[in-house]
Image: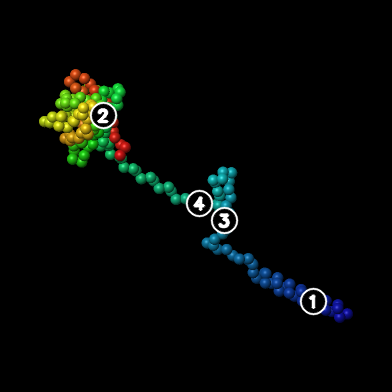
Amino acid sequence: MKKIISLLILIVLLISSLSVIESRLDQDEEPFMEFDDNMMLPLIISAGENINEYTISSGGHHHHPKYPKHPKHPRHPKFPGPKRAFAYFPSPPDITKGVVVFWETSKNNTLVYGQFSKGFVEGEEDNYSFKVYKGDQELVDLKPKDDDLDRILKINPNGSTDLFLFVFNDTLISGVGILDTDLVISTSDSLIGKDRIKPLTCW
């Protein structure tokens, strides 16, 4: 009899506790945490068929990441025109063998220097001419005005020359325009060398 009474008391206590819980649940319409619109939500990133394409979703809305625009490449300044040039004389086919270099300076003149290893005759310095031709037209005579060539060109017994250097009072490259023309070395009765003047850009 006592066991039955104690069991009935336990049942009554359970029923009363359940009613209390239900009343509290009725008062709290939203028992879970409320999220503010400005609160951070977990991001879900899913890859498409193309592995480089991604979709980012948050709270049911899809947002594509915005990447900064690639900056425009600056325009590179134009390179100045060449201020140096050269003419190389191979042998054969030329009789002479050597090189002549032209170098414009900031003083609006041109340094002309070079050297040859063969093809000249000692003692006949004044008989040689160094002229620039554009086609069949003579463009410029490199022999310094009012000066003898033997003061500049020194020929050795073996047909070579010493290193020579003189100043031409004009801008031969940017002014006269000797690039892609022919430097012709000759005597009064023979041609010993004819080769193209090319821009020198190796240094």
Residue drawn 24% across the image and 25% down it: 119
Where's residue 164, x and y in %? 20, 33
Element type where label 4 sits in the image: loop
Towards the viewer: 199 or 87: 87
Furthest toward the left, the residue is 146
Q: Is residue 87 above or below residue 189?
A: below
In this picture, residue 58 sits left or right of residue 200: right
Q: Amino acid at mark 3?
A: Leu
| Dot 3 and dot 4 residues touching (CB under 8 Å) | no
Q: Between label 2 and label 3, give the one nearer the viewer.
A: 2
At horizontal 19% and vertical 19% (from top left) the residue drawn is 189
Residue occupying image coordinates x 59% and y 65%? 34
Residue visible at 22% across and 30% down? 161
Q: Is residue 14 toward the left or the right of residue 140 in the image?
A: right
Q: Tell me which amino acid carries mark 4.
A: Pro
Q: Is residue 188 visible?
A: yes
- Specify which label sits upstream in the sequence, 4 or 1: 1
Ranked by sequence position, the earlier of labels 4 and 2 is: 4
Pointer 1 or 3: first along the chain: 1
Where is residue 20 drawn, in percent x and y? 71, 74
Indicate the secondary structure of the residue bearing disc 1: helix
Residue that carries the numbered disc 1 in the rendered image: 10
In this view of the protein, can residue 134 be seen by the observer? no
Mark 4 sits on what residue? Answer: 65
Residue 86 lies in what quarter of the image?
top left
Q: Is residue 35 above or below residue 161?
A: below
The numbered disc on residue 117 is 2
Badge nearest the viewer, 4 or 1: 4
**Residue identified by numbered label 3:** 43
